[in-house]
Image: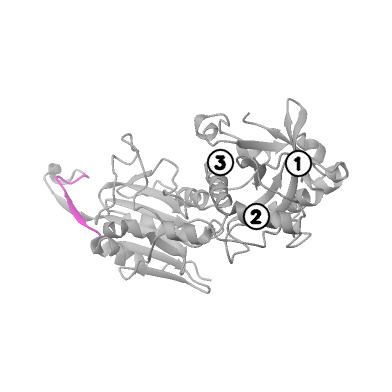
Amino acid sequence: MDYKPPRVLASDIKTFAPTHTVEGDRRGYLDGDYDETYSGYKSVIIYIQKGLSDYSELIENVARLALNIQKGGGRKYPLIPVSFGQEEELTHEGKYFDLGYINDYLNDTEIAKALMRLSTNKPVNPAIIPELFPKTDKRSLYYGKTEVNEDDLLIIIGKKDQVYFDKRIENKLKKSIQRRILFVEIAEDKINWIFRKYQPNFINKNEIMENKNTRTENFKLGEFHGKLNPEKSDSEAKLRNDIFLIGAIGLVWSNKVTTRIKILAKEMPLIQDQNRGECIDLFGIDKNWIPYIIELKLKNSTERITDAVNQVLNYEKLFKAIKDNIEVEMRDKLFYENFNFKGEPQKVILSESEFFEGIDPISTNYRNAKDLYMCTFYKTADIKNKNGYIDLIDRRGNTGIVNLGIRNK
């Protein structure tokens, strides 16, 4: 697949950029008495669909294209990377790229890396843009900017037939703004670069969520599915398989296991007619029948901890909507007579310590996510093989439990 944009695309988009006049030539010619007119967008917002972080070459080309479009635009402007999926708000890193004039000092790789971090590697379909501009407060980093207008350039990276705008913002997406949208559409066999001809699709987000929360059966309880031996011995799939086959994890409090969780399912699907997409990596219960939602992350994941938190909170929301159906299958398939979940779902984010570096696990943001445990493998060195990979089956399988240390409690 060719990830390069058409050669003339940058100049075509620049042709439709708004013009503005600078009083007195910035370069100091003619004693500053010479006004000059430039073409350039007031800001550039790049929206990327969740689940596209593997498209690194395409993302780098989009970042490079955005800089080329604005090159020589004669104005300073913010480039704002955000991602969208099914969250209530656009996801962003609370910062923008402060650009302007010739942009030759900026490495476009930094923009691409930010987009890849925001996108994550979990596919989302349908992917919904809930708002044109990310939510910010009065201390906004974006020059106090709070909305999109016709002087902005919007670049959307998404898969064909998967990108929608929330119908609640249809009135905000005026024709003048639509004509300033570049849609980088990922089709099955090619990339379509659509400018000025993009026809947005709208969807009622609330209705979609209600329709999605109707899975009634086949939650993969008690069954192994997928490849037994993934190609990569250090993959998330390998860790997930090993923990499921061992069958239990223990939460270690003060060097003592006080909570034992029986693992009942891996990659447990939550959405009707989808076996992939929104799936709980590992699902289990403790002796009191309290449910546990466990999300695995590799230590070198490009996702941020806030993405992982939002992900498990979304799974919790979906789980609550269908838990009655899961209870029925627990009784019928696993023979748990009169089974009913007790209490609120507990949530675990599990990775190696490197994934949590640079964050304060007991900060307000994470503490406010109720019943959330950030965990690492307890005594990780004891379960690594000679190649440095975690090997749970060989190192811990005979104990029947994988112990986890809790970082934020």
Q: Residue furthest bottom?
A: 189
Secondary structure category for the residue under label 3: helix
45 or 260: which is nearer to us? 260
Q: Which residue is mark 3?
A: 305
Numbered disc in front, either 1 or 2: 2
Residue under the image location 33 percent in, 62 percent down? 181
Q: Can you give x and y, in whole percent of width and height, for residue 63 in the image? A: 43, 55
Numbered disc 1: secondary structure: strand
Q: Nearer the viewer, residue 14 or 374?
A: 374
Q: Residues within 10 Å of mark 2 (few under 14, many from 20)?
A: many
Q: What amino acid is found at the position of numbered circle 1 in the picture?
A: Ile
Q: Which residues are magenta?
A: 17-27
Q: Which residue is mark 1?
A: 249
Q: Is residue 171 magenta?
A: no
Residue 123 screen position, x and y as percent: 55, 59
Quadrant where the C terminus sits is top right
Which residue is disc 2 drawn over? 326
